[in-house]
């Protein structure tokens, strides 16, 4: 069972916290993490590119000219792909579905793997509480400067939705705040440090330990 230090917003030590091996001591499998991250990216994608095929274009119901006797190639519609203004062959369509199904057990396992890697790399920080924040950006910047984040990107998670924390982190580049129960693989991979309050760590452990 791993043990991490608990800090306050002044960067001072506020004790220690034991982490469950079932969540924070999992062996990392890069293939599972990559699969879940790619699936999450694909499920979030929205297909904007859309071309019209010959059935979507108006007109062209009448045969341009008779089948034989004109000396020209036979044509059935002016909306065929070879005509200017005609339909597009095999173009991108909005109806295409890129969603990938990920089992809940696999998704939680991937989150545990990334969290375990953060703990092993000393990029998992626990803060006793964020209640001291008043919503000012400079306060959070000062607090992050006192924590061992080395001015790198950080994802901040809390047990409850804190308007003060969200407001304070909104204007800081490379910093984002989420609720502990909504942590996902893409967010964890996008930020180098993961900072969570003590109550949030307990809630996250309980959430990821469910079968």
Image (cartoon, grey):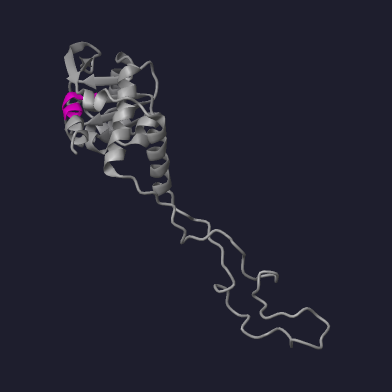
> Is 16 on the left-hand or right-hand side of 64?
left
Q: Is 170 left or right of 161, judged from the image as shown?
A: right
Is there any visible trace of residue 102 in the rendered image? yes
Question: Image height check: is 179 above or below 81?
Answer: above
Residue farthest to the top, as pictured: 13
Q: Is residue 193 above or below residue 107?
A: above
Tell me the residue at 22%/23% (across/down): 21
At x 48%, y 60%, the residue is 94
Q: Residue furthest right?
A: 71
Q: Position of residue 204 (x, y in %)?
A: 21, 32
Magenta portion: prevailing SS class: helix
Q: Closer to the camera, 34 or 118? A: 34
Q: Quadrant of the C terminus?
A: top left
Q: Position of residue 13 (x, y in %)?
A: 20, 11
Report which quarter residue 112 is drawn in.
top left
Percent across and percent down for residue 43 are 39, 48
Query: Closer to the camera, 151 or 64?
Result: 64
Of residues 25 and 8, the one drawn nearer to the viewer in this rendering: 25
**On-image quarter of the N terminus:** top left
Residue at position x 18%, y 18% from top?
18
Q: Quadrant of residue 175?
A: top left
Q: Which residues are magenta?
A: 196-202
């Amino acid at each position: 069972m791993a043990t991490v230090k608990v800090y306050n917003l002044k960067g001072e030590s506020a004790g220690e916290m034991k982490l469950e091996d079932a969540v924070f001591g999992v062996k990392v499998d890069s293939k599972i993490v990559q699969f879940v991250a790619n699936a999450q990216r694909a499920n979030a994608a929205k297909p904007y590119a859309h071309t019209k095929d010959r059935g979507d274009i108006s007109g062209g119901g009448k045969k341009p000219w008779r089948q034989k006797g004109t000396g020209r190639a036979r044509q059935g519609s002016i909306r065929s792909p070879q005509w200017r203004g005609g339909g597009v062959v095999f173009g991108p369509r909005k109806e295409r579905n890129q969603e990938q199904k990920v089992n809940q057990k696999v998704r939680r396992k991937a989150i545990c793997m990334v969290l375990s890697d953060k703990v092993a790399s000393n990029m998992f920080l626990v803060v006793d509480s964020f209640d001291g924040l008043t919503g000012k950006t400079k306060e959070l910047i000062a607090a992050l400067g006192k924590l061992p984040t080395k001015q790198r990107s950080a994802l901040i998670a809390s047990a409850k939705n804190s308007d003060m924390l969200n407001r304070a982190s909104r204007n800081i580049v490379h910093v984002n705040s989420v609720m502990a129960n909504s942590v996902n693989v893409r967010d964890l991979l996008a930020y180098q440090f993961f900072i969570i309050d003590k109550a949030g760590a307990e809630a996250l452990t309980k959430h990821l330990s469910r079968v």
